[in-house]
Image (cartoon, grey):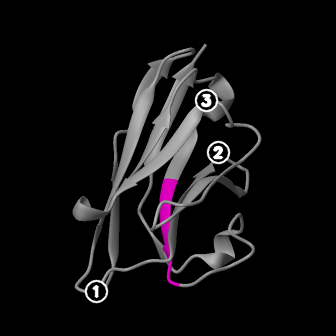
Amino acid sequence: QVQLVESGGGLVQAGGSLRLSCAASGRTFRPYAMAWFRQAPGKERDFVAAITWSGDRTYYADSVKGRFTISRDNAKNTVYLQMNSLKPEDTAVYYCAARKYYSATYYSPTAYDYWGQGTQVTVSS
């Protein structure tokens, strides 16, 4: 069974930075890709960024392009989200997700098979 555990969330002022981590465990964990989503109160879960496990492709939501960077360390089974120039509108619970197979709809939560419990990110103005 695959488990995803996020860490690194917290409270930061606007313009600041945070780095989220997602550690994956499972005897045969070999996802096709991993991603970060976020969900603000009363809103849907939105795509933030994705990366193939090979690292050859990354995808970003327009709202975070140029500010956030997704990366992975296969040896540690960990994916990261470096968040710079944070804005109050980035405030949300951030979720890590993994999917077993290729999907053209990498931006859709329904394309993912495994989810973490989420970590809160709060950006104050």
Mark with earlier residue (1, 2): 1
The crowding category of the residue bearing disc 2, from other C-alpha atoms within 10 Å (few below 14, some 14 to 19, many at least 20), is: some
Q: In the rendered view, would you say 13 is above or below 10?
A: above
Between circles 3 and 2, the one closer to the viewer is 3
Question: Mark number for residue 40?
Answer: 2
Q: Name which residue type carries label 2.
A: Ala
Residue on which disc 3 sits: 67
Q: Amino acid at mark 1?
A: Thr
Q: CA distance from mark 3 to mark 2?
A: 19 Å
Using residue 6 as the reference point, say whether residue 53 is left or right of it.
Answer: right
Does label 3 or label 2 sit earlier along the sequence?
Answer: 2
* Disc on res. 91: none
Q: Which residue is mark 1?
A: 28
Label 2 SS:
loop
Q: Majority secondary structure of the magenta segment?
A: strand
Q: Using the rendered view, name the quadrant where residue 86 is placed.
A: top right
Quadrant of the snapshot with the N terminus: bottom left
Q: Nearer the viewer, residue 21 or 51?
A: 51
- Looking at the rendering, in which quadrant would you find the C terminus? top right
Q: What crowding class fits label 1: few (fewer than 14 Cα within 10 Å), some (14-19), or many (20 or more)?
A: few
